[in-house]
Image: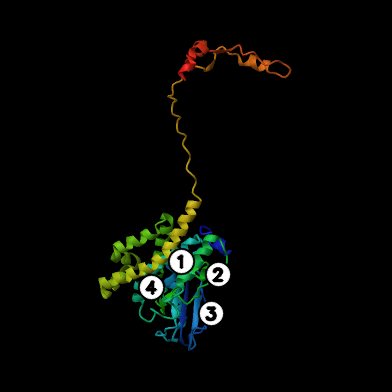
């Protein structure tokens, strides 16, 4: 179900470190025994002697020195930094999260995706190896299938394909969400900055799930778009806003919010439906009975039971083999019972 832990849902091990880095490189003399903490992988999408180096799981503060060690190991390798096929992929650990959390993380990222792609450069915006959400025609249909699987507790995980800017296919195998949108870089400080952006997406997403404020989050960032962009992207975001202009920055954020709405709305609908299903019914409060204000004065023809009635004696007389009790304790109010003379029957000639 949506509240299950990711590691338990997919039967994978919990990971303590939050980040994993993949760096794709094209050029000559770029294949070599990797330094400590890195491993070499073949990548079929690379050309011209390309190679991919994958780091071990690490925390945020270890990213910069780990990238520097890889850069030092490359030595004098001739790297094609302009290749559109090469890039940096950042995995964010989600094994300790609930199943709903990675879906909301992706939706939060979609809010800022157009602005973020504008910052990262035109060779990443629209790149076939990291397609943005608004360029994928079947993304909504795939997401609804994914949402249905999570909330029904099913294990038929629908795969979208990894060539998108935010990849959730890695969640099933590694327990991570993968961002493929970043360009090639061996600058450890720059890659660490990108990782901090991702941490901001995660922070906002977890807050949304905790407060059930899915669509309210969109209203908040639209209320002050510039402040929202600076909160996520920091000084790099402020510089980009100055370069792009305030109007374009707001339009890019508004476009991202429109995309995110299509993902947060069904999430909120499913969560609300589940919450209502498990909501405890309210306790019924017994209201005091209203006093009987009807007239209880004996009326003509009524029979009354005297206060001196002995119910134990009556029950003893009704035992099997005994005669029925004499109704000695019942009396008829004689003065109110009408007699034949009280009917005042008119003479026959009056009919």
Of callouts 3 and 4, the N-terminal one: 3
Task: For the residues labelled 4 and 1, say whether their Cβ atoms are less than 8 Å apart.
Answer: no
Q: In which quarter of the image is the N terminus?
A: bottom right
The Cα atoms of the two marked residues, 4 and 1, are separated by 14 Å
Q: Residue placed at 38% from the left, 74% from the top?
A: 190
Mark 4 is surrounded, within 10 Å at the Cα level, by few (under 14), some (14 to 19) or many (20 or more) other residues, namely: some
Disc 4 is placed on an element classified as: helix
Q: What element carries label 3?
A: strand
Q: Distance between the residues labelled 2 and 4?
A: 28 Å
The percent position of residue 128, horizontal first and vertical second, equals 44, 81
Image coords of residue 23 (percent x, y): 46, 78
- Which mark is drawn over residue 219? none
Instruction: Identify which residue, 71 or 198, lies in the foreground.
Output: 198
- Contact between labelled residues 4 and 2, with CB atoms less than 8 Å apart: no
- Per the image, the residue denoted by label 2 is 173
Q: Which labelled disc corresponds to residue 41?
A: 3
**Residue bearing the label numbered 4:** 189
Between residue 82 and residue 228, name the one nearer to us.
228
> Along the polypeptide, which appears first: circle 3 or circle 1?
3
Estimate the spatial distance between the alpha carbons at disc 2 and disc 1, rounded to whole Å.
Answer: 20 Å
* Picture disc at residue 59: 1
Of residues 37 and 118, the one nearer the viewer is 118
Q: Position of residue 164 (x, y in %)?
A: 45, 75
How packed mark 2 is, by other alpha carbons closer than 10 Å (few <14, some 14-19, many 20 or more), is: few
């Amino acid at each position: 179900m949506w509240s299950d832990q990711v590691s338990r849902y997919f039967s994978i091990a919990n990971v303590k470190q939050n980040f994993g880095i993949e760096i794709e490189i094209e050029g000559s003399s770029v294949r070599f025994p990797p330094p400590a903490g890195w491993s070499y992988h073949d990548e079929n999408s690379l050309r011209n002697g390309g190679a991919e180096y994958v780091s071990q799981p690490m925390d945020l503060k270890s990213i910069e020195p780990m990238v520097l060690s890889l850069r030092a190991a490359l030595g004098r390798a001739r790297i094609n930094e302009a290749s559109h096929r090469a890039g940096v992929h950042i995995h964010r650990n989600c094994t300790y999260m609930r199943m709903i959390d990675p879906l909301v993380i992706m939706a939060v990222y979609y809010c800022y995706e157009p602005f973020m792609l504008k910052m990262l450069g035109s060779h990443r915006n629209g790149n076939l190896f990291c397609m943005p959400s608004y360029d994928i025609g079947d993304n909504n249909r795939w997401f609804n299938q994914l949402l249905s699987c999570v909330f029904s507790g099913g294990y038929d995980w629908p795969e979208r394909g990894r060539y998108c800017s935010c990849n959730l296919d890695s969640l099933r195998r590694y327990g991570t969400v993968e961002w493929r949108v970043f360009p090639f870089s061996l600058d450890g400080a720059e890659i660490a900055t990108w990782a901090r952006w991702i941490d901001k997406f995660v922070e906002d997403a977890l807050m949304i799930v905790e407060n059930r404020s899915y669509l309210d989050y969109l209203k908040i960032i639209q209320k002050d778009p510039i402040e929202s962009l600076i909160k996520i992207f920091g000084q790099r975001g402020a510089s980009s806003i100055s370069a792009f202009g305030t109007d374009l920055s707001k339009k890019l954020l508004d476009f991202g919010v429109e995309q995110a709405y299509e993902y947060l709305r069904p999430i909120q609908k499913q969560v609300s439906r589940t919450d209502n299903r498990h909501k405890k019914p309210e306790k019924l409060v017994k209201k005091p009975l209203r006093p009987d204000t009807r007239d209880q004065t004996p009326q003509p023809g009524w029979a009354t039971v005297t206060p001196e009635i002995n119910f134990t004696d009556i029950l003893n007389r009704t035992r099997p083999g005994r005669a029925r009790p004499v109704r000695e304790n019942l009396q008829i109010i004689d003065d109110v019972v009408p007699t034949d003379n009280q009917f005042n029957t008119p003479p026959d000639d009056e009919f």
